[in-house]
Image (cartoon, helix red, strand yellow):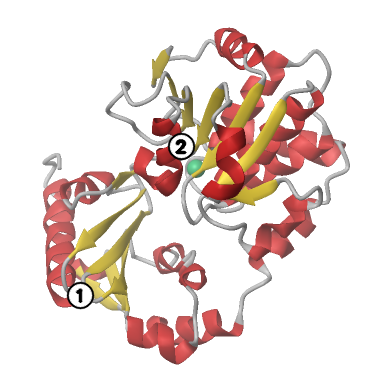
Amino acid sequence: MHYNNIPIDWNKVHGVIDAAETVMLTTHENPDGDGLGSESGLYYHLNEEGKDVRIINYSPLPTEYEYLNEDSIFESYDESIHDSWLKNVDLVIIFDVGDYVRIRTLVHPIERYGLKTMNIDHHPHTNDDIFQHNLVDLSAAATGCMVYDYLNVARDKPVEKNSLLGIYTAVMTDTGCFRYSNTDNKCHEIAIQCLNSGIETHKIYQHIYENSTRSRMKLMGEFLSNLTYELDGSFAWFIITLDMMEKANAKKTDVEGFSDMVRTISGVEVALMIFEQDSSSCRINFRSKGKYIVNGIAKTLGGGGHAFAAGALIEGTLNDITKKAVNATKSSIQNQMNGLLT
Ligand SMILES: [Mn+2]
């Protein structure tokens, strides 16, 4: 079953999920609110249906999402614990992954036991063949919106509050709290349903966004005072070095949202973060206000993503990668200014 950015027949999807007795749900490494919320959103439904369902991720649950875990539903993959269960799994559902390899070591049991996979995602996937079932909707604001679509077809009863908590988390985080250009009617429709079901949406916001570590704040002060502006201020970029991380005693998750922050500056159309991972690789992250497409640039650098939010993991030294990424971004923006596609 392949719906690669064509309208998804959720009844057919329901046929596949319904036929599975044992189901594993997973998402990408360093999971975000969309991946985790999609998992818990579907988990509670499948659990209610009496299926043997588990959420197993490569990464542990980030502390700010602990409120989704009242029933201890999130597990992190450990071959010695999980493989005896995994080998009998009928269906693996992968959310929001962008690229299959981002489930990291969970690729191994899938391949070892020949498990069937279903990809549910709103990132572009060029290859349908990796998954038995590929469900991609580029127009979905969040993967959680797709889970919501599914549940509305699969259920006779309204979606339960514990599922809605996950779906709200997915939608809120992937739309930048209903601010980004991907925010559509469905996002607000979901929000209304969540409010009607008694979810205290402001508390979800507080859990995720009003829980910054002091290290994060220290790092923020550091990088915000060292932004570089190019192309008359329409492009701003910054570097987070290992040294800065160490001085601030920061963790990798502390940089979450930094590029979004730079995009909020007046006149800045594209923000770029170059984040040193180790002595031989950097993660780069693009955010665009909507005038310039950035996933093309990310793709030429070996990554991908959405039109206005993309990234890549690049091998090389910080200096080389910085030069490469900044130059590629400048020329792409200039080409797009001149009406050329990149
Ligand atoms: Mn997403």
Crowding at mark 1 (Cα within 10 Å: few <14, some 14-19, many 20+): many
The N terminus lies in quadrant = top left
The residue under label 2 is which amino acid type? Pro
Q: Are marks 1 and 2 in contact (CB under 8 Å)?
A: no
Residue 307 on image: x %, y %? 33, 42
> Quadrant of the rendered structure where residue 122 is?
top left
Residue 226 on image: x %, y %? 33, 85
Residue extending furthest right? 198
Can you tell which mark lies on residue 6?
none
> Could you tell me which residue is drawn at 30 percent across and 76 percent down?
239
Report, in whole angstroms, how far the alpha carbon at label 1 lies from the one at label 2.
34 Å
Q: Is residue 202 left or right of residue 8?
A: right
Nearer to us: label 1 or label 2: 2
- Marks counted in the figure total 2
Vertical order, 190 against 134 (above or below): below
Vertical order, 303 against 111 (above or below): below
> Could you tell me which residue is drawn at 14 percent across and 39 percent down?
341
* SS for callout 2: helix
> Could you tell me which residue is drawn at 25 percent across and 74 percent down?
229
> Could you tell me which residue is drawn at 22 percent across and 60 percent down?
314
Q: Is residue 283 visible?
A: yes
The C terminus lies in quadrant = top left
Can you tell which mark lies on residue 318?
1
The residue under label 1 is which amino acid type? Leu
Residue 133 on image: x %, y %? 44, 19
* SS for callout 1: helix
Residue 68 on image: x %, y %? 73, 50
Can you tell which mark lies on residue 109?
2
Q: Is residue 175 visible?
A: no
